[in-house]
């Protein structure tokens, strides 16, 4: 299958399985989605549904116990799965794509000054001199709203929100086309959270960056989303335009997930999803959500097809 | 303020004085009067270097079967307030009255007895349970400590507590260890442990912030159900305003050690009066695709240091509606725009 060049990121049948003592965990099991330039896609789902593994699979940051890693990841025209690890590191990581890891504010190096940490990707990936990289870092600091004199500080001297900004500056310093954010605000206060999303919106319009945002918090995810991808038990069950999704989610799981969000405005009482997500070691055959689905019927014992509705996709028998 | 002044102040607030007429009415469970919790800072290990004013003058009453939600950012003093009610800190000044008994200076057996009436639900359920103990052992521990000697009775009470938090079959869960349970189940065990001594008061410190969005509502509904059934008073500490309206009667908004707005849910959320509460509400998102198209208005800066809080209103350096010469000079008193709704803001003068 050739890549359609209108997409910045095109993921086809991506799989990432881990070997554990209890069996093979199918954390990412055949994921497909596309992202256009300057778009933001939000991947939502419950914990343990494979969201973080998906980010790792896209950026090829693999642990040692990988059992199977396959599928295709196109970045513009580059098919990254064919590259060797060394080529991948030189051509893709931090040049085309970067990551703000989960709890990024606690993943800064405690013994390096934050300015040096932001400058480091420039020196490693573009081979620029330290002075020049520091200039770039200062520019980045101004851009993300960290006072410039903070470059000589250590991570522990900054507040949580400032550290998160530094982590974002680090991911943007090489001006990659795509930035992945794994739960960027889950440990932050409401006001700081709003500040970080304001910043991401500004970066998106000023630098034309694309984002993959991974989160379990649907309410805040709507702050950045152009498109929403819902993940359940290692698979994407629905991809839709944000305006369509937040008004009328199509998959029963998406609908349940939306209904579980307590809303500040409006009057609907929040509800919860009964049962638990299935084990990814032996996922059920047929639709993986069937056991918890209120709209289950006979056909759900068979693997549902992915139905394409315009640009949106939904993996459910109800929409066939 | 020197240490001498502090001790003097502590003496003047004698227990007898704090017994107001309201706290004698039987349905007032917890009465907090002018509570201050200050932590002393020291330089070179012994020289006095000021106080961290974690809680600075808070008063409220909690009646049976009522939930008070305490909302605020990290570092605003909500955890210090909670720890004081649990007597993990002692109040620096002011009184805490539980069922018309002043509990400031409880010791030994009295303290143990008091704590058996107060349940505590921690934020991180996995961190709150010893990983080497089975669920049964974890739930039996409070019973052993409080002198329930008969193993059969203990077993029955553990079973009942587990069934109450909808963990059945209870026997199956009793043999398990914390790591074998999902986050939601772990939080249920923590709730069962808090409930096992049949407390009168339950303190829930961000009980759902570590959990998945899909189980949050389930846990909150469970807490609400237990409260109704046992006529509990609940203090629900959170930073998430969107859950508050469904699960509490009263909302207290805290900023820099003070309650800056309090009232019932309707008053605080619909007749919001303090600029800080406005900012919090504005920053809380509902799922809506239009959010991505607009920038939010967030007050600049960060919460002040609690060692040297700003003069006047503590929010004035960040406040968009600051009145020069008033807000930055004098601490606003509690204004009452409607009965029961208190706002610490000069705008309501």
Image (cartoon, grey):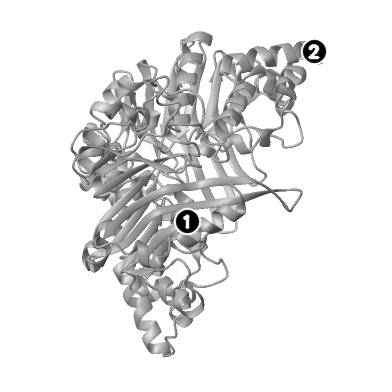
Query: What is the x, y in percent for residue B192?
Result: 37, 68
State the residue in front, A156 or B9: B9
Left or right side of B133 for B41: right
Residue A242, placed above or below residue B103: above
- For the question of whether residue A237 can be seen, the reply is no
State the residue in front, A97 or A79: A97
Residue A161, placed above or below residue B289: below
Residue A90, placed above or below residue B125: above
Q: Residue at x 45, y 77 (%)?
A: B110
The reply to whether dot 1 and dot 2 touch (C-beta < 8 Å) is no
* Secondary structure category for the residue under label 2: helix
The circle on residue B162 is none
> What is the tally of numbered marks visible in this picture?
2
Q: Residue at x 45, y 33 (%)?
A: B314
Residue matched to label 1: B93
Q: Give neighbour class at mark 2: few <14, some 14-19, many 20+ (Cα, 10 Å).
A: few
The chain ID associated with circle 2 is A
- For the question of whether residue A164 can be seen, the reply is yes
Query: What is the x, y in percent for residue A192?
Result: 48, 30
Q: CA distance from mark 1 to mark 2?
A: 55 Å
Query: What is the x, y in percent for residue B45?
Result: 74, 52
The circle on residue A131 is 2
Residue A307, placed above or below residue A233: above
Left or right side of A259 for A159: right
């Amino acid at each position: 299958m050739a890549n359609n060049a209108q997409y910045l990121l095109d993921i086809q049948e991506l799989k990432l399985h881990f070997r554990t003592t209890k069996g093979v965990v199918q954390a990412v099991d055949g994921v497909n989605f596309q992202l256009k330039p300057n778009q933001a896609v939000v991947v939502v789902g419950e914990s343990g549904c494979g969201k973080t593994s998906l980010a790792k699979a896209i950026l090829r940051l693999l642990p040692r116990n990988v059992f199977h890693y396959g599928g295709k990841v196109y970045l513009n025209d580059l098919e990254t799965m064919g590259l060797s690890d060394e080529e991948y590191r030189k051509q893709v990581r931090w040049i085309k794509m970067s990551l703000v890891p989960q709890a990024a504010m606690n993943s800064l190096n405690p013994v390096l000054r934050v300015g040096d940490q932001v400058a480091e990707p420039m020196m490693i990936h573009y081979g620029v001199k330290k002075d020049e990289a520091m200039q770039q870092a200062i520019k980045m600091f101004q851009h993300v709203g960290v006072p410039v004199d903070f470059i000589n500080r250590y991570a522990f001297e900054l507040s949580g929100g400032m550290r998160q900004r530094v982590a974002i500056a680090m991911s943007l310093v090489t001006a990659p086309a795509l930035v992945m954010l794994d739960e960027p605000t889950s440990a932050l206060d409401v006001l700081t959270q709003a500040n970080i999303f304001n910043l991401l919106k500004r970066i998106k319009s000023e630098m034309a960056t694309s984002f993959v945002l991974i989160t379990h918090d649907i309410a805040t995810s709507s702050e950045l989303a152009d498109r929403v991808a819902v993940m359940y038990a290692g698979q994407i069950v629905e991809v839709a335009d944000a305006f369509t999704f937040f008004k009328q989610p199509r998959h029963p799981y998406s609908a349940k997930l939306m209904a579980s969000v307590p809303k500040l405005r409006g009057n609907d009482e929040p509800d919860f999803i009964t049962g638990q997500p299935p084990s990814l070691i032996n996922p059920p055959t047929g639709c993986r959500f069937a056991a918890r689905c209120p709209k289950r019927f006979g056909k759900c014992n068979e693997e549902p097809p992915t139905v394409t509705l315009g640009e949106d996709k939904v993996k459910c028998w109800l929409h066939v | 303020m020197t240490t001498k002044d502090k001790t003097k102040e502590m003496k003047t607030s004698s227990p007898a004085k704090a017994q107001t007429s309201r706290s004698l009415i039987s349905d007032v469970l917890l009465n907090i009067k002018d509570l201050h919790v200050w932590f002393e800072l020291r330089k070179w290990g012994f020289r006095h270097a000021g106080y961290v004013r974690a809680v600075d003058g808070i008063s409220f009453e909690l009646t049976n079967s009522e939930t008070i939600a305490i909302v605020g950012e990290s570092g605003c003093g909500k955890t210090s307030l909670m720890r004081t009610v649990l007597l993990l800190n002692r109040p620096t000044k002011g009184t805490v009255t539980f069922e018309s008994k002043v509990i400031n200076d409880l010791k030994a057996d009295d303290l143990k007895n008091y704590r058996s009436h107060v349940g505590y639900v921690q934020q991180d359920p996995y961190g709150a349970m010893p990983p080497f103990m089975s669920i049964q052992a974890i739930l039996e521990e409070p019973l052993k400590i409080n002198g329930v000697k008969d193993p059969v009775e203990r077993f029955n009470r553990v079973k009942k507590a587990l069934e109450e938090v909808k963990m059945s079959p209870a026997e199956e869960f009793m043999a398990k260890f914390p790591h074998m349970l999902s986050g939601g189940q772990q939080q249920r065990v923590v709730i069962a442990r808090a409930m096992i001594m049949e407390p009168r008061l339950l303190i829930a410190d961000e009980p759902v912030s570590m959990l998945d969005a899909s189980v949050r509502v389930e846990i909150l509904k469970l807490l609400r159900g237990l409260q109704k059934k046992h006529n509990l008073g609940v203090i629900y500490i959170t930073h998430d305003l969107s859950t508050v309206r469904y699960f509490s009667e009263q909302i207290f908004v805290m900023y820099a050690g003070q309650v800056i707005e309090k009232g019932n849910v309707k008053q605080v959320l619909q007749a919001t009066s303090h600029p800080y509460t406005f900012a919090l509400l504005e920053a809380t998102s509902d799922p809506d695709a239009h959010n991505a198209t607009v920038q939010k208005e967030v007050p600049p800066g960060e919460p002040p240091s609690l060692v040297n809080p700003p003069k006047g209103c503590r929010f004035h350096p960040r406040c968009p509606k600051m009145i020069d010469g008033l807000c930055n000079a004098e601490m606003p008193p509690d204004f009452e725009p409607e009965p029961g709704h208190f706002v610490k803001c000069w705008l309501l003068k």
